[in-house]
Amino acid sequence: MIYFPNGYIRTVQKTGGGFSGGKPVAVSEILGSSIACHYETIQKDKKGKDEDSFFTRASYRVRIDLQEFNAEDIELFDSDGTNLGRFTVQNAQKLLMVEQVLITI
C-alpha cells in the first residue's frame, strides 16, 4: 500500500500501426485508468538545449502498489491533477519486500 500518495499515473497503451493493403495504419493511444503513486523528482532543470531553444529536462522515481506493470509510456499527474508530462519508462522493478513497483521515468 502506498502510504503517502502524492499523485497518480496513467499508462499509455498503443494499438494499431503497421500496414494494411499496402497503406500505413495510424497508431492510436489509449490511456489506462488512474493508479495512485508516490513520486519523487530525480532531476528537473532547464538545461535541455535544442537547436534554437531551451527546454525542461525531468526524470522521476515513481512507486505504485505491487501489480503487473509492462507499460512503455506513462503520464504522471500530481495530487491536484496537473499533468507533469508523458514519459518513457526506463525501468520497472518489483520490490517484493514492500509490495511495490519502482518505476524510473
Image (cartoon, rainbow, N blue to C red):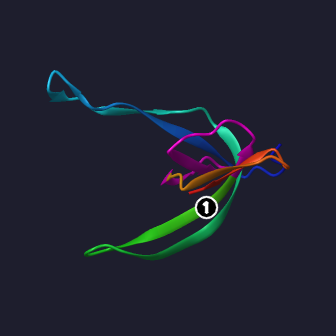
Residue 103: image location, x then y, percent:
64, 53
The residue depicted at 67 percent of the width and 54 percent of the height is: 62
Q: Nearer the viewer, residue 42 or 21?
A: 21
> In the image, residue 38 lies at what x, y percent?
72, 53
The residue type indicated by label 1 comes to: Tyr
Residue at image coords 85%, 49%: 97
Which residue position holds label 1? 60
Residue 30 against residue 84 in the figure, above or below: above
Measured from the top left, where is residue 90 in percent x and y?
A: 54, 56
Residue range in magenta is 63-87
User: In the rendered image of this protein, does residue 80 appear above or below residue 23?
Assistant: below
> For the N terminus, which image quadrant?
top right
Q: Is residue 22 left or right of residue 30?
A: left
Furthest residue toward bottom: 47
Tell me which corner region of the image, top left, top right, bottom left or bottom right, holds residue 34: top right
Choose between 60 and 20: the one closer to the eye. 20
Q: Residue at x 53, y 47 (%)?
A: 75
Would residue 52 be found to the left or right of residue 55 on screen?
Answer: left
Q: Is residue 74 magenta?
A: yes
Side of 39 where 3 appears, left or right: right
Q: Residue at x 61, y 44 (%)?
A: 9
Q: Tell whether 90 sits left or right of 50.
A: right
